Amino acid sequence: MKVAVLQLTSVLDYKENLATLRTLFKEAVFKGAEVIFMPEVFYSMSDGVTPTPNLVEEGNEHYKEIQKLSIDFKVAQIGGSAASLVNGKIVNRAYNFDSEGRDLGFYDKINLFACDLPDKKISEAKNYTAGSEYKTVELGSVKIGLGICFDVRFSEMGLFYRKAGAHILTYPAAFTVPTGKAHWHTLLRARAIENQCFVIASAQWGYHNDKIQTYGHSLIIDPWGEILVDLKEGIKVGVADLDFKKIDHIRHSVLMNR
């Protein structure tokens, strides 16, 4: 399977983000991508103090705009999240569509980010309600375990997906710069190595507004922990071929009782 990761600098204006996304989708498809992995809060990035007014609801105009990307470019999209209104509450929901725009299911972020650093205090719980269920989606015979950003710090989640037969773990993100520099590569490589799965993490990068700057470094990592793609800085696309036979080879070579 040939997969792409997108790296964005999303802003509040969803129309501006969609214009950038359409350019990146075109490039990814030109490079042969069958599946595009999207970053966290790709649709509309707020300042973290108040939620975006551009909330997705099932079937509303924002939902249809996201779905339309897959329909127009005839490519599956996985894992990108958007602030969504569900039963009067806002959740950070990852959307997934196949190449014909069929909804494959969603995942609501369970582990909400909070930090208390000398120069930054953030609590996603001020704006979001946490999800409660791990979720997988399937593309043909490939099973994908869904996480979002801060979820990468919780190894039990990856293990759950490993036991459920996942081939790919995905962690779309908007990682802050200090925590990104300290932990991003280490955490994602650890999830790949311990679960012997591919790990794909599309990330936000750059200055989004006067309160939020993100780290970038969108990654595709193989089950041995080798980094196949690192987008580092900038708005761009990365593509890699995933050979799922490598999972079986590594799991037979390094026997781990599960």
Image (tube, grey):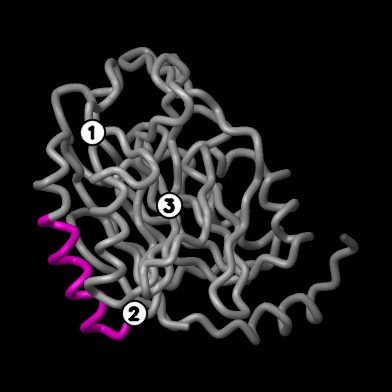
Separation of disc 1 and disc 3 at Cα? 15 Å
In this view, the residue in front, 243 or 107, is 107
Give the quarter of the figure containing the C terminus: bottom right
Measure how far apart labels 2 and 1 are at the Cα level.
Answer: 28 Å
Left or right, 146 with reference to 117? right
Tell me the residue at 28%/16% (across/down). 49
| Label 3 Cα crowd, 10 Å radius (few <14 / some 14-19 / many 20+) | many
Q: In terms of sequence position, does the residue under pointer 2 or pointer 1 come before the other? A: 2
* Residue 212 visible from this viewpoint: no
Magenta stretch bounds? 19-32
Main secondary structure of the magenta stretch: helix
Vertical side of 164 occupied by 228: above or below = below
Q: Does the magenta stretch include residue 26?
A: yes
Q: Which residue lies at the image location 22% right of the left edge and 51% below the top edge? A: 8
Amino acid type for the residue under numbered disc 3: Tyr
Q: Where is residue 239 in the image (x, y as percent from the top left)?
A: 34, 75
Q: In which quarter of the image is residue 173?
A: top left
Instruction: Give the residue pinned by disc 2.
Output: 33
Q: Position of residue 68 (x, y in %)?
A: 26, 62
Contact (CB < 8 A) between labels 2 and 3?
no
Q: What residue type is labelled 2?
A: Ala
Q: Position of residue 166 (x, y in %)?
A: 67, 65
Q: Name the mark nearer the viewer: 2 or 3.
A: 3
x, y percent for residue 145: 60, 57
Alpha-carbon neighbours of circle 1 within 10 Å: few (<14), some, or many (≥20)?
Answer: some
Numbered mark located on residue 94 in the image: none
Q: Which of marks 2 and 1 is in front?
A: 1
Q: Residue at 22% of width from left, 26% of height from top?
A: 53
- Residue of label 1: 54
Q: Which mark is residue 95?
A: 3
